[in-house]
Image (cartoon, grey):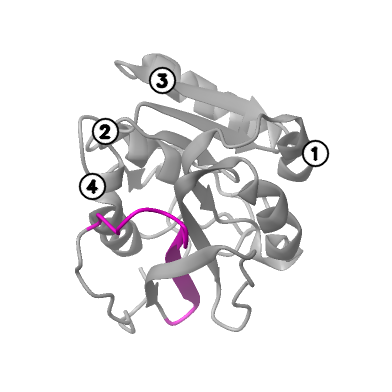
Amino acid sequence: MNKPSKGHAGAGAPPGKIRLIGGRWRGTRLAVPDAPGLRPTTDRVRETLFNWLMPALPGARVLDLFAGSGALGLEALSRGAATAVLVERDPALATALRALVARLPGGEAATVVQADALSWLPMQADADYDLAFVDPPFSAGLWEAVLPRLSAKLKADAWLYVEAPLAAEPTLPAGWRLHREGRTREVRYAVYRRSAAAADTLAGTPASDDNGPSQ
C-alpha cells in the first residue's frame, strides 16, 4: 500500500477503525490516516484471503511490499508466519508502523522498511520469501514493473497475493499459476503459486464472487 495514492477493496475506512481479525494479535487496531486514496483491504476480503492461506502461514517468511496500514503483513504474523518485512514508501506511515510493532508482543518478527519498492527489490537476496503480498497504489499501475522483479525473490514453492482493479488484471511472470481468486464490485484479489511447486497443500475451499456492498 504505497501511499497516499492507493485504491483498495471496499470503501475507505474511517481513521483508526481497521483491526487485525485473527490470530494472536486479533483485535489490534491499525492506524489508518485520513489520507487521499488510503483504503485498506476490507475485513471480508482479508478473512477470505487468510482462510485460503492458513495452511501456508506457519513458519513462513513474508514480504508485504506496499504495506500502508500493515494489515496484510501483520495479519500473516498474527496467524503464524515467522517473520515479515513491511515495505512502505511514505515516511509517516513507516514511522507509525514501527511504533505499532514495537508495542506488540513478539513484534520483533516484523521489520519495517521505509523505501520505494521498485528501488528496494533489486538489492534483496533471491529466493528469500515464502509468501508476498502485492497491493500497490492502483493509480500508479505498478504491477507490470513489480511482479517480474519480485518473482526472483520468492522461493520455488512460494505463494503470491495480488490485488488490482477489476479492469486491470495483471499478467504474472512465467511459472505462476492461479490458485484462488475473488472479486468485489471494485477489485479482483487472487492467490498464485509457482507451477513447479509440489502438490497443492492449501485448503480447497472454492472462491466466490463478492458482489455485495463495499465495506
**Residue 195 inside the magenta-drawn segment:** yes
The region drawn magenta spans 185-202
Relative horizontal placement of residue 205, taking residue 35 as reference (left or right): left
Q: From the top left corner, tell me how far across and down residue 22 is, in percent.
A: 21, 43
Q: Secondary structure at mark 1?
A: helix
Q: Which residue is mark 3?
A: 109
Residue position marked by numbered label 1 in the rendering: 119
Query: Which residue corresponds to the image point at 36% horizontal and 47% vertical from the top-left?
Result: 17
Residue visible at 26% across and 57% down? 47
Q: Residue 159: give x, y in percent of width and height.
A: 44, 52
Where is mark 4, residue-wise? 55
Q: Considering the numbered disc 4 on the image, is that residue within a helix, a strand or a loop?
A: helix
Q: In the drawing, what numbered circle is on residue 79?
A: none
**Spatial distance from mark 1 to mark 3, Cα to Cα?**
23 Å
Sort mark 4 into few (<14), some (14-19) or many (20+) by Cα contacts within 10 Å: few
Query: How far from the left and from the top, in percent, is residue 95?
Result: 60, 24
Measured along the vertical axis of the image, is residue 49 above or below residue 63? below
Mark 4 or 1, which is nearer the eye? 4
Location of residue 71 with respect to 99 vertically, above or below = below
Residue at image location 48% in from the left, 54% down from the top: 160
Q: Mark 1 is on which residue type?
A: Ser
Label 2 is placed on what type of residue? Answer: Gly
Badge 2 density bin: few <14, some 14–19, many ≥20, Cα 10 Å: some
SS for callout 3: helix
Q: Amino acid at mark 3?
A: Ala
Q: Earlier in the sequence, mark 3 or mark 2?
A: 2
Residue to which mark 2 is pinned: 80
Q: On screen, 26 above or below 2? A: above
